[in-house]
Image (tube, grey):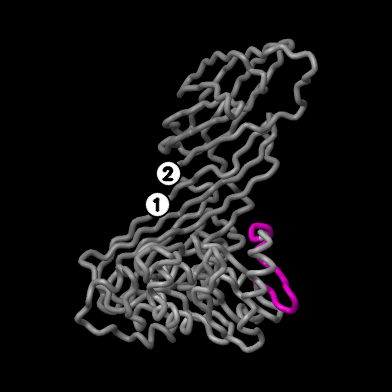
Amino acid sequence: MPVAASAIYFLNLRGDVLINRLYRDDVGGNMVDAFRMHIMQTKELGTCPVRQIGGCSFLYMRISNVYIVIVVSSNANVSCAFKFVVEAVALFKSYFGGTFDEDAIRNNFVLIYELLDEIMDFGYPQNLSPEILKLYITQEGVRSPFSSKPSDKPVPNATLQVTGAVGWRREGLVYKKNEVFLDIVESVNLLMSSKGSVLRCDVTGKILMKCFLSGMPDLKLGLNDKIGLEKEAQLKSRPSKSGKTIELDDVTFHQCVNLTRFNSEKTVSFVPPDGEFELMKYRITEGVNLPFRVLPTIKELGRTRMEINVKVKSVFGAKMFALGVVVKVPVPKQTAKTSFQTTSGKAKYNASIDSLVWKIRKFPGQTEATMSAEIELISTMGEKKLANRPPIQMEFQVPMFTASGLRVRFLKVWEKSGYNTVEWVRYITRAGSYEIRC
């Protein structure tokens, strides 16, 4: 693995060094002078965040009124270095009460040096989790909401949390009511032709969780994905139940998920962090259920008149409904006057985006809505109408509906005390890039 940093400097806007830390001896202590002379004084700070001067590379980022500069002399992992800077700033803010600037650095020299020693070792990033570091670096910053309340109880198993496999959750959590909230949020992307044929379609989704569970629970999540159902049927030596299955592509998990168990059993098992977090992200490219179909008809009546008819049909179940439906129909820049007729919602002309904006607050499933518009144009001699018009765009959100067909089959919670839990599951589909050519 390439080195992320040989040295790190914190500079103010004048180029003065506020604080620095050398992690390796392959760079000199005066390398910051080269950064100040060749980059800051030449006003080239905004051109590129990575610069090479001599045999060293300078990776820098401005946060508030502070420049954070990382210096390396070898082939560095640039993405890792910038990720380290972002995570380090978030860590400092958690100690300083949400602020990170020149004054916060000057008031917390000792604390920053202690943190810099912990979060990087010989140029390689280490643990940057504020929850873990606050277990054994308890010094207060200028204002730390975590450290301001003194605790009479000793921190349980701090060493285990730092070196063990469950560093994202501390022990000793107690809730009167143990609840789990699970949200499946999807964005459907579509490019459809004017005749209604699908040119491109995919769904990107994420599973968000909010856990208020006591102790150290072990959760197991079952989805209706094809591979998981086939693996479960194979382990139980019986055929899988009939029902729609989906194939998940490009799946990424939170660090709490047991990947070894997922590879062997195809089940999502994990010890959840406390509070809200993103469990997984995925993508679907086949078998997408489109929530809406749009059929536009545009007629040009001479040089100064147009007639636009747009029919929108909801394809999801009759018991469901969509909220905040917005249809944007692009029109020529020389539009002078518009008149509308709609079966549902309200429409108006927005000159700032050169579009007819049709808004429907609540759109029931298995229904249709139409908009008819007559447009008068300013007559121009030299300007010709474009053959390729911009596409119609849609915005919406449909509760309790997933375009991918993903469903939660079960969510099991096990904890050694055996308490009862309440599980809540919600689904919602939103418009990503939902476009229809006209």
Residue 150 x/y as whole percent: 22, 76
Residue 352 x/y as whole percent: 57, 28
Residue at position x 59%, y 34% from top? 393
User: Mark number for residue 399?
Assistant: 2
**Along the line of sight, the residue nearer the viewer: 366 or 182:** 182
Amino acid carrying label 1: it is Arg
Left or right? Give the position of 27 relative to 104: right
Give the secondary structure at mark 1. Answer: strand
**Labels 1 and 2 touching (C-beta < 8 A):** yes
**Along the line of sight, the residue nearer the viewer: 41 or 204:** 41
**Along the line of sight, the residue nearer the viewer: 259 or 136:** 136
Work out whether residue 271 can be spotted.
no
Q: Which residue is mark 1?
A: 426
User: Mark number for residue 273?
Assistant: none
**Mark 2 crowd level (few <14, some 14–19, many ≥20, 10 Å Cα):** some
Amino acid carrying label 2: it is Pro
Give the secondary structure at mark 2. Answer: strand
Q: Which of the 4 image quadrants contains residue 416?
A: bottom left
**Along the line of sight, the residue nearer the viewer: 289 or 353:** 353
Residue 30 x/y as whole percent: 63, 81
Q: Give the magenta-colored segment's residue range.
A: 45-58
Specify which label sits upstream in the sequence, 1 or 2: 2
**Mark 1 crowd level (few <14, some 14–19, many ≥20, 10 Å Cα):** some
> In the displayed structure, would residue 141 be above or below residue 27?
above
Residue 292 forms part of the magenta stretch:
no
| Quarter the C terminus occupies | top right
| Quarter the N terminus occupies | bottom right
Residue 56 forms part of the magenta stretch:
yes
Q: CA distance from mark 1 to mark 2?
A: 8 Å
Residue 362 x/y as whole percent: 42, 31
